[in-house]
Image (cartoon, rainbow, N blue to C red):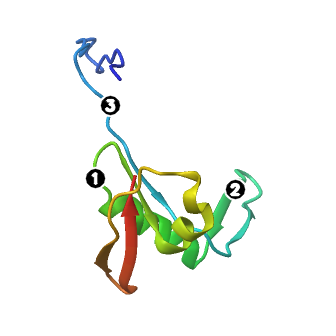
Amino acid sequence: ASIPYHDKSGRSFDDCTLQIRVGIHVGDITCGVLGQRVPKFTTCGTAVNMAARMEQTSKPSMIRATQDFHDLVGDAERNWSEKQSISLKNMGTVETYLL
């Protein structure tokens, strides 16, 4: 999808295309509000780190999901790519799918 964009100097980039990468995983997380003066909601845990790694290894305009998410969704989504094994730093080899 094309989105009108202007940089700080006012130049227009009307022909730019926005491409995002998304990573999805399921699991336990810890969340809460940190800070008193400027409170911020934050999440942490292995599931958050795994989802971040899925995003980092995804391709533009695609969603990379772990085997756990794929098993949870099942046949509700039919456009999954073939299963891929990827090696992640500090997490070993993980089975993933692209959507």
Mark 1 neighbour class, 10 Å CA radius: few under 14, some 14 to 19, many 20 or more:
some
At horizontal 25% and vertical 11% (from top left) the residue drawn is 12
Amino acid marked by disc 3: Leu
Q: Give how far apart the Cα atoms at labels 2 and 1 are.
A: 28 Å
- The answer to which quarter of the image holds residue 20 is top left
Give the mark toward the camera: 3 or 1. Answer: 1
Amino acid marked by disc 2: Phe
Amino acid marked by disc 1: Lys
- The answer to which quarter of the image holds residue 89 is bottom left
Mark 3, secondary structure of its residue? loop
Identify the residue under disc 2.
41
Left or right of 38? Residue 46 is: left
Q: Which mark is residue 59?
A: 1
Mark 3 neighbour class, 10 Å CA radius: few under 14, some 14 to 19, many 20 or more:
few
CB under 8 Å between callouts 2 and 1? Answer: no
Q: Which mark is residue 24?
A: none
At horizontal 63% and vertical 74% (from top left) the residue drawn is 27
Q: Give how far apart the Cα atoms at labels 3 and 2 are.
A: 27 Å
Mark 1, secondary structure of its residue? loop
Q: Give how far apart the Cα atoms at labels 3 and 1 are.
A: 13 Å
At horizontal 48% and vertical 73% (from top left) the residue drawn is 67
Mark 2 neighbour class, 10 Å CA radius: few under 14, some 14 to 19, many 20 or more:
few
User: The N terminus is located in which quarter?
Assistant: top left
Work out whether 32 lies above or below 67. Answer: above
Left or right of 52? Residue 15 is: left
Identify the residue under disc 3.
18
At horizontal 31% and vertical 63% (from top left) the residue drawn is 57
The location of residue 53, given as percent across then percent down, is 40, 68
